[in-house]
């Protein structure tokens, strides 16, 4: 991010639900990703639901704890295009999935994620698929146990680093653009109605 954006962020209350969404979900909102994980304080969860209520995006509660809520925000293209790809299904099968109906995938993942958070199961590597990460990078992360990546940006890259670096730059531009709009007084929920 540029110095201008850092100064802009310093002048804003980054602890609001709107700012958390802008900082963490801008590439998703801009259509550069099919989904996004958002972890917010319990008190902010209701505000996040309001922000996305009249948008084209869906919100799925992955985990609701005493102090935090974990939400999976997604566009229809997550289920329609991405999760049906053969290389994606292969990873799901490796992770023990057999039912590929979207709601069943989400429900099983939510249970596995909660088990991970409570310490009763290992990290659910399929999370990268739900976040729309390229399957080759999810598989690379699993194969290399998170080590030996070619580049680290929004995720660890194991193949095609130049393409992913360019994509990460586009992610930064999306964040900067959305932050500028909010700094000018635009309401995020209103912007999402037209996204």
Image (spheres, rainbow, N blue to C red):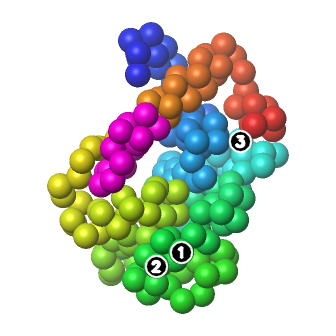
Magenta stretch holds residue 165:
yes
Quarter of the picture containing the C terminus is top right
Q: Position of residue 92 (x, y in %)?
A: 47, 78
Please tell me whether residue 97 belongs to the stretch shown in magenta. no
Which dot marks residue 51? Answer: 3
- Where the N terminus falls, by quadrant? top left
How crowded is the residue under tag 3: few (<14 C-alpha within 10 Å), some, or many (20+)?
many
Q: Is residue 42 visible?
A: no
Position of residue 53 relative to residue 108, above or below, is above
Quarter of the rendering containing residue 191? top right
Q: Is residue 186 left or right of residue 108?
A: right
Q: Please tell me whether mark 1 or mark 3 is closer to you in this view.
A: 1
Would you say the residues marked 1 and 2 are in contact, meaning their CB atoms lie under 8 Å apart? Answer: yes
Spatial separation of the CA atoms under disc 1 and disc 2 = 6 Å
Q: Which mark is residue 90?
A: 2
Q: Residue at x 52, y 57 (%)?
A: 132
Q: Residue at x 81, y 35 (%)?
A: 194
**Observer-nearest residue: 41 or 187?**
187
Q: Position of residue 83 (x, y in %)?
A: 59, 68
User: Crowding at label 2, few (<14), some or many (≥20) Cα neighbours within 10 Å?
Assistant: few
Residue 86's label in the rendered image is 1
Residue extent of the magenta highlight: 154-168
Left or right: 53 in relation to 165 = right
Q: Which one is earlier in the sequence, the residue at label 1 or at label 3?
A: 3
């Amino acid at each position: 991010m540029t110095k201008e954006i850092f100064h802009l962020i310093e002048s804003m209350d980054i602890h609001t639900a709107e700012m958390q969404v802008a900082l963490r979900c801008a590439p998703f909102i801009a259509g550069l990703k099919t989904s996004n994980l958002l972890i917010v304080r319990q008190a902010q969860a209701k505000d996040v639901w309001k922000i996305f209520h009249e948008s084209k995006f869906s919100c799925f509660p992955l985990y609701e704890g005493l102090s935090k809520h974990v939400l999976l925000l997604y566009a229809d293209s997550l289920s329609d295009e991405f999760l049906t790809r053969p290389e994606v299904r292969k990873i799901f099968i490796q992770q023990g999935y057999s039912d590929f109906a979207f709601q069943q995938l989400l429900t099983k993942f939510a249970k596995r994620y909660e088990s991970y958070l409570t310490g009763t199961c290992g990290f659910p590597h399929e999370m990268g698929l739900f976040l729309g990460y390229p399957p080759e990078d999810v598989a690379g992360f699993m194969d290399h146990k998170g080590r030996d990546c070619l580049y680290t940006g929004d995720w660890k890259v194991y193949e095609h680093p130049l393409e992913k670096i360019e994509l990460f730059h586009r992610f930064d531009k999306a964040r900067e653009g959305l932050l500028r709009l909010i700094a000018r007084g635009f309401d995020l929920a209103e912007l999402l109605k037209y996204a």
